[in-house]
Image: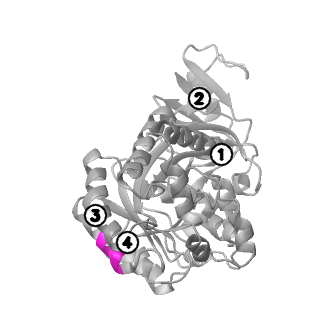
Amino acid sequence: MRTLVVNAGELAHLSNGDLSIPLKGEEMSDKGLNVYEKGMGILIEDNIISKISDSDELTMEFAPSWNGKESATPGLLVIDAKENAIIPGFVDSHTHLVWEGDRSNEMALRQNGMSYSEISDIGGGISKTVSSTRKCTKSKLIEIGIRNAENALRLGTTTLEAKSGYGLNLETEISILNAYDAVNEKTTCNIHSTWLGAHDIPKDRSKEDYIEELINMQLPAVLEQGIAKWADVFCEPGWFTIEETMNILSEARDMGLQSRVHVDEFVDSGGLAMATEIGAVSADHVACSNEESRAGADKAGVMQTFLPGTQYVLGASEFPPIKNCLDNSWAFSIATDYNPNCNTISMPFAASLATHRCGIDPIAALVASTRNPATTLSDLEFPLGGSLREGGEASLNILSTKSVESWCQSPGMNPIAITIANGHIVK
C-alpha cells in the first residue's frame, strides 16, 4: 500500500545540512531553512518517503482520479491534510518506559518539605517502584510497555529510547530489556534500549557488592543477549559517584557498549565533564552543569538532553538553562523523562515547558524534539527519523492547526490530528 499525503499547510522538514549532526543556535530557529510553505505533498512507499513535491503535481501523477474524498487508484491511500501543518514524528530520547507501582503519595511529601533524597531514604522513590516491578511477570512487563508505547504514539512520538533500571537485579533488569524487544515487535514505535542497572543501590545490598554484580553479571548478560545499545548510570550525590560511574561506564565501553548518563540533576557534581571524558553519546538532565562543561561537551559531540518535566513535577524554582545553550550554539535535545515520578510521555508538553518556561522558540523546540535527538539514536549511515526527506523514514505528524509553531502551545491537549509511524497510520 502506498500513501499520499496532500494539501499540507506548513511542512517542517528539518532536513537541511548534514543529517548526522545536530542543528545549533540560530539554525535551529531559522524557519526559512527548516519549513516549506503550504501546498506540499508527501508520497510514502514501503514505509519510506519516496517523494516530497507540490501537492497538485503529486496528485496528477499518482492519484489523477482522486475526488477529495477517496482514491480510485488501487493500492493507494490518499490523506488530505486540509492545509494543516506537518512535522516529523517526535524522537523521545530519555524514557523509563516499563515500571509498575504508584508513587502519587510523594507529591504530599514534597509539599511538606521532603527532598527527593529524603523520600528515597524512607523507602520511597526508585526503591518503591523496584519492589512493585520485581513482582511483575514477563507478560505483564510487555503489557505495560505496549500500553505506554501506544500512548506515546498517540501523542506523536514515533521513536523513543527506553531504559531499564527498576529491577536492580539480574533477572528483572534482563526481563525489562527483553520486554522492550517484544514491544518493538508489537507496536509501530521504534524502541531503542538502554541498560540502567545502576539506577540505585538495592536496599539489601552494599554498594560495593552491587557494583560488582553490575560489572561482572548484569553487563555481560546484557551484551551476550544483545538487548541494549547503551549503558547508563544515575550519577548524583547519594547514588553513584563520579568515580563509580566512570568505572561502570569504562567497563561497558571496553566491552563495546556506548553510554548515555544521568548527570547534574540536583547539583553540579562535575557529571557533564565526566560524561564528556567517557565519550557519552548523551548527558541527560544537566540542569546544574557549569558553562565550561557545556562548552566542552558541545565541542566533543556530547548531546545535552534537557528534561524540563522533572523540574516541573519536583516544583523547582528554576527551569533548566536551555536558552543558554541556544544562545551559545551548543547542541541540545528535549525529552520527557517518563517515569513514576514524572508521569507524562507527551513530547508536546515537555516542549511547552521549554517554550513557556525556558524561553526558546517553537521551531527550536521542534528541532530539539526530533532531528537533534535522532542523531544520538541513529546509525550514521542512515539516521532514523527526526526529519522529513526523500529516502527517509516515513514518520510524521499532521497537526490540527495550520501553523508549525502551534505544535507545543496547547499544554494538556493533543495537537496531533494524524500520526504516521514508520509508514503505518496510528489508530
Distance from disc 4 to disc 1, alpha carbons, whole Å, reads 41 Å
Q: Earlier in the sequence, mark 3 or mark 4?
A: 4
The residue positioned farthest toward the left in the image shown: 254
Q: Residue at x 43, y 83 (%)?
A: 270
Numbered disc in front, either 3 or 2: 3
Please name whichever residue, 4 or 279, is drawn nearer the observer in this view of the structure: 279
**Quarter-wise, where is residue 342 in the image?**
bottom right
Check disc 1: other Cα within 10 Å, few if <14, some if 14-19, many if 20+: many
Q: Which residue is mark 2?
A: 4
Q: Which three-letter amino acid code belongs to the residue tagged 1?
A: Leu
Q: Is residue 82 above or below residue 100?
A: above
Q: Earlier in the sequence, mark 2 or mark 4?
A: 2
Q: Which mark is residue 215?
A: 3
Distance from disc 2 to disc 4, alpha carbons, whole Å, reads 58 Å
Please name whichever residue, 140 or 11, is drawn nearer the observer in this view of the structure: 140
Q: Which residue is mark 4?
A: 206
